[in-house]
Image: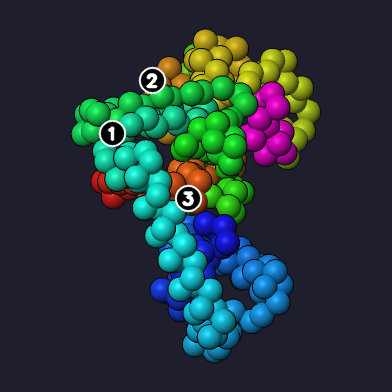
Amino acid sequence: MRAPDLAIVAALSSAGTFTGAARLLGVAHTTVSRNLRDLEAHYGARLADRRDDGVVLTPEGERLLETARRIEAELASLERDITGHDYRLTGHVKLTTVDILAWIYMPTLARFRQRHPEIELAIETGTELRNLSRREAEVALRATNTPDDHHFGRRLGALEFYPYVQTARAADGALPWIEYGNRDCSQPATRWLRRHHPSARPQASVPTPLMMLRAVEMGLGAGLLPSAVADGSPGLVRLSDDMAFSIDIWLLAPMELRHTARIKALFEVFQERNREG
């Protein structure tokens, strides 16, 4: 029994519906349904009855949940005995992200450090994100519309991209365009440019939105930028108020770390930021 398997069964038991279980886990309801089918195929037994008003665990499902919870409790007790860190607000958190999200959420990360000075925070940014499943990092702050189903997560918002240009170049008749390199935003940006400016031929490329911001500010050309950073630049102007595309922002952690005190504390600070707007 893996921790994600227990989480699916426990969430269904608590919520009573696929939608409610998905909300508890921070995943899509189709993911919960698919994972339950996989579990039932693995054990060769029906674990839940689907009804018009929700989902109810079968006796086999209840037995699996009871046994899994006992095993989880024993393993958690063993881990606490060995490490002594899981339920103390001390230790180390390694967060992997990209430069634009580190830039936007640095005030939130600073609040976390001020509130929990005994937790060491390591922030890693780069074009290649660390792998959570292999424990190359414990938390990921990612811009993606397809978060990994096997991770615990919370959607924080979205990066909304609009076309911007340096104010001094807004009246130029034939603006040069800047494109993205091989990043998550490169494909939707390319599709938008082909649809709205089919004759444009980008004359420069940058790897990340933060580099795009600097390039547009310096007059290299027009480009698609997240409004969260571009609207704060006095030297830029939007070419259109119609959003080009958006990418969701997710805070993710391995499912088995979701109850660890230092990880919970980090999630709580991000949730506070969302409530405050």
| Image location of residue 122, percent across then percent down | 41, 24
Q: Quarter holding the N terminus?
A: bottom right
| Among the two numbered marks 3 and 1 on one chain, the one whose residue lies closer to the N terminus | 1
Mark 1 residue crowding within 10 angstroms, few (<14) / some (14–19) / many (20+): some
Mark 3 residue crowding within 10 angstroms, few (<14) / some (14–19) / many (20+): some
| Among the two numbered marks 3 and 2 on one chain, the one whose residue lies closer to the N terminus | 2
- In what element is the residue under mark 1? loop
Residue in front for this viewpoint, 272 or 197:
272
Residue beneath disc 2? 234
Q: Is residue 184 magenta?
A: yes
| Image location of residue 140, percent across then percent down | 49, 37
Three-letter amino acid code of the residue under disc 3? Glu
Which numbered circle lies on residue 171? none
Task: State whether residue 61 is above or below residue 250.
Answer: below
The residue at 63%/34% (across/down) is 185
Report how far apart the C-alphas of labels 1 and 2 lie in the structure: 41 Å
Residue in front for this viewpoint, 236 or 55:
55
Mark 2 residue crowding within 10 angstroms, few (<14) / some (14–19) / many (20+): few
| Image location of residue 101, percent across then percent down | 46, 31
| Image location of residue 111, percent across then percent down | 25, 32
Report how far apart the C-alphas of labels 3 and 1 lie in the structure: 18 Å
Residue interval drawn in magenta: 180-193
Residue beneath disc 3? 256
Report how far apart the C-alphas of labels 3 and 2 lie in the structure: 44 Å
Residue beneath disc 1? 90
Residue in front for this viewpoint, 75 or 162:
75
75 left or right, relative to 199: left
Asked if the residue under mark 2 is in contact with the one under mark 3, i.e. CB atoms within 8 Å, the reply is: no
Q: Is residue 112 visible?
A: no
- In what element is the residue under mark 2? loop
